Amino acid sequence: MATKEALYCMTKIYVDGSLHWHTWKRNIFLFDVKRERYCFFPLPPPAFEGNDCKDIRLVEYEGKLVMSYIDKESDFIKV
């Protein structure tokens, strides 16, 4: 990898021919299995605005990559 990033092992998600991981630096690491290429893209701003007390999860829903999080201060789940 070109940058030093650590992946959350529990967040590996397979969607549309690619594996996706949430990184410690608030990015998503995408690996295209067929082309054997990778890239990084940032998490959407709601994932880290306001505080760092959010439990972020990547999930697959109806063939799409979805980010959900629990705001630990308010105990709400947001998608």
Image: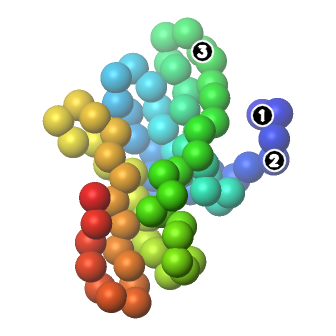
| One can see residue 9 in this view | no
Residue 14, percent across and down?
A: 38, 33
The residue indicated by pointer 3 is 36
Q: Nearer the viewer, residue 9 or 78?
A: 78
Residue type at mark 2?
A: Lys
1 sits left or right of 48 in the view: right
Kind of element beneath mark 2: loop
Name the quarter where the C terminus is drawn: bottom left
The dot on residue 1 is: 1
Q: Is residue 21 above or below residue 72?
A: above
The single residue placed furthest to the top in the displayed view is: 35
Residue 69, located in which quarter of the rendered image?
bottom left
Q: Residue at x 34, y 39 (%)?
A: 65
Circle 2 residues within 10 Å: few <14, some 14–19, many ≥20: few
Mark 3 or mark 1: name the one nearer the start of the chain: 1
Circle 3 residues within 10 Å: few <14, some 14–19, many ≥20: few
Distance CA(mark 3)–CA(mark 1): 13 Å
Q: Residue at x 35, y 74 (%)?
A: 70
Asked whether the residues under the numbered discs 1 and 2 touch, taking CB atoms below 8 Å apart as contact, a structural biologist would say yes
Q: Residue at x 62, y 18 (%)?
A: 37
Kind of element beneath mark 3: loop
The residue indicated by pointer 2 is 4
Q: Residue at x 51, y 58 (%)?
A: 45
29 sits left or right of 2 in the view: left
Q: Is residue 19 above or below residue 44?
A: above
Residue 72, percent across and down?
A: 39, 85
